[in-house]
Image: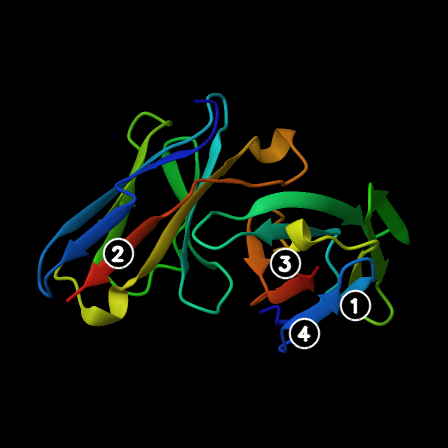
Amino acid sequence: SQKIEQNSEALNIQEGKTATLTCNYTNYSPAYLQWYRQDPGRGPVFLLLIRENEKEKRKERLKVTFDTTLKQSLFHITASQPADSATYLCALPSLGDYKLSFGAGTTVTVRA
Amino acid sequence: GAGVSQTPSNKVTEKGKYVELRCDPISGHTALYWYRQSLGQGPEFLIYFQGTGAADDSGLPNDRFFAVRPEGSVSTLKIQRTERGDSAVYLCASSLGVAGTGELFFGEGSRLTVL
């Protein structure tokens, strides 16, 4: 089965800086990879999807890369704001493409 | 509302009791998932429905856990003889299934505490 590893340490950064989060996976390369945001006490919320043939995807201040050779995705939050403070989860579909498996998440805290 | 609705939001029960958690997915979403999330961990897959049938229940930890979706919409997760280790947040999610990109829409979760 797929093993998904995200930065185990929480990330504390100054407002305005860029946060970079890592998601590494083992075994097969999925057709796509997703990133979710989760606030305390809430369910995860979808942010971005990047397909295996896409090197990079952007949405406002968010940027995601997908390197199938390294089996890695990087998630960047540029010009970070305190409101970006949350836990960010990466998720990969199963080979059958119907089920998502999640990493443990990385907690980001942006200081004003 | 237009989102995934889960009830109850909080449930405290005693060891050995029976619990039901309900999920009302987004209208028109054929795929429905149950996940379990413990503190500091990501959501862990339990079961997946496509329509009324459980297409994959490989994540259910044991036979005390059971889920139904009789009319292809609302789903109920049932836990018998609860144990303290069952304490977690149970998340429900729905999606368009094969018609979509795989994006999941989550509810806010049901927090289960077994004393």
- Which residue is label 1 attached to? A72
Q: Residues within 10 Å of mark 1 (few under 14, many from 20)?
A: some
Q: Alpha-carbon distance for marks 3 and 1?
A: 15 Å
- Which residue is label 3 attached to? A88
- Which residue is label 2 attached to? B112
User: What residue is shown at x 64% (from left), y 64% (from top)?
Assistant: A109
Q: Is residue A30 left or right of residue A94?
A: right
- Which residue is label 4 attached to? A7
Task: First in sequence, mark 1 or 4: give its number.
Answer: 4
Q: Quadrant of the N terminus of chain B?
A: top left
Measured as percent of width and height from the top left, residue A53 is found at 88, 50
Element type at marker 2?
strand
User: What residue is shown at x 87% (from left), y 69% (from top)?
Assistant: A69
Q: Residues within 10 Å of mark 4 (few under 14, many from 20)?
A: some
Measured as percent of width and height from the top left, residue A66 is found at 83, 59
User: What residue is shown at x 79% (from left), y 48% (from top)?
Assistant: A50
Q: Of B51 and A57, which appears nearest the observer?
A: A57
Regarding residue A23, the answer to whether it shows in the image is no
Task: First in sequence, mark 4 or 3: give its number.
Answer: 4
